[in-house]
Image (cartoon, grey):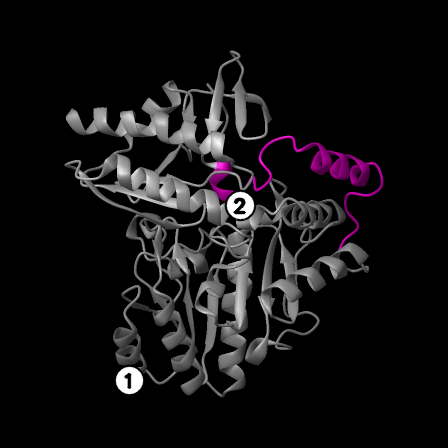
Amino acid sequence: MSHLMNTYNRLPVAFCHGEGCYLTDSEGRVYLDALAGIAVNTLGHAHPEFVAALAEQAGKLLHVSNVYRIPQQETLADLLAARSGLSEVFFCNSGCEANEAAIKLARMFGHKQGMDAPTMIVMEGAFHGRTLATLSATGSRKVQAGFEPLVPGFLRAPYGDLEAVRQVLKHHAHVTAVMLEAVQGEGGIHPLDPFYLTGLRELCDEHNLLLICDEVQCGMGRTGKWFAYQHAGILPDVVTVAKGLGSGVPVGACLAGGKAARLFGPGNHGSTFGGNPLAVTAALKTIELMESGGLIANAARIGAWLKENFAFALKGLPGVLEVRGQGLMLGIELDRPCGALVGQALAAGLLINVTHDSVIRLLPPLIFGAREAQELVEKLVPLIKDFLKE
């Protein structure tokens, strides 16, 4: 019996190595990876330039602590600021830590406005993490159940409903921020209408609120732009990233600008491991290879092809409700729970995921090419058709 804490229903497979968009298990079987470690492995597996950069940095320095300057951090902060339009960056280890930093920024912003109990508007169906504050912000009772009392200070509105946000503001005086995902991931792959984000930006400006975009899953080029909010042409006050930022090395970041800039001072927040030399090297090399390889344009192009071809292949099929998403962040919603498809796909040499019980979630590496896309459609469509016949 394993001494691992029983927090995952793990699939009966162990991978020993990978190359590009493929993984090989301990028995020598090869799988097409259409999940990328849940939107993490931006560069796929064992990218030679990425591996070389990590090996070189590991041979020099892994960790020194944030009580000293880390020049690579400063370089990475400059790169993220230039690509996001924001001005400050705090480095941490994960998405939920980045979101914790964002929540703390919002509360500090509220206190500076004279609020005793600043409150944030969050969205139904959201997923922001599993720490106590981020699971309280998350719109899922499944995630929250058993961990009450929840952290107070969150008001919920339907995702994509601007009038609902107006009504919350009308009845609550101490709102300090609105926090949302530009594309909900765990909630079922739901992209927002750009006009909603534009309206929300205007509403936040009108009421002096921070607009916080959680880009932990949908950021770093996955939707065909550096950040999903850029599809709407807006600029949030706070943006959080992680997952794909380090291509498998744990690193997260909370970016701030506008009204959220210069809120934190020394001692207000911190992280022991956050932004250490190895993690920052991974992020720097990820950005370099994304740009030199044209991976953001590739995500847009291959994602559009996949969306179109899945929609065509599944058109009119009873049980298929919708094919949706942006870039290489796609969901196929069925009219019934379909968790069994994960194991069936595994047996067919394909790695996928099911979220929100009935949505097949596809998050391939950004290096996914035409050949891999064709293979994905050819393997997954028959599995869906057979599953719906059962």
For the C terminus, the quadrant is top left
Question: What x and y, as percent, mark residue 389?
Answer: 16, 25
Membership of 11 in magenta stretch: no
Question: What x and y, as percent, mark residue 107?
Answer: 50, 74
Quadrant location of residue 194?
A: bottom left
The number of callouts visible is 2
Local secondary structure at mark 2: helix
Q: Residue at x 18, y 41 (%)?
A: 335
Q: Is residue 70 visible?
A: no
Cα distance between the residues tagged 2 and 1: 43 Å
Residue 170 shows which numbered tag? Answer: 1
Q: Residue at x 34, y 52 (%)?
A: 144
Of residues 104 and 69, which is closer to you in this image?
A: 69
Tell me: residue 46, above or below residue 139: above
Which of discs 2 and 1 lies nearer the camera? The answer is 2
Q: Residue at x 44, y 58 (%)?
A: 134
Q: Residue at x 30, y 48 (%)?
A: 142
Of residues 220 and 120, which is closer to you in this image?
A: 220
Question: What x and y, as percent, mark residue 248?
Answer: 60, 40
Q: Which residue is mark 2?
A: 298
Question: Which residue range is magenta in the image?
Answer: 36-65
Membership of 56 in magenta stretch: yes
Whichever of labels 2 and 1 marks the residue nearer the N terminus, that label is: 1
Q: Residues within 10 Å of mark 1 (few under 14, many from 20)?
A: few
Name the amino acid type tagged 2.
Asn
Name the amino acid type tagged 1.
Lys
Tell me: residue 302, above or below residue 31: below
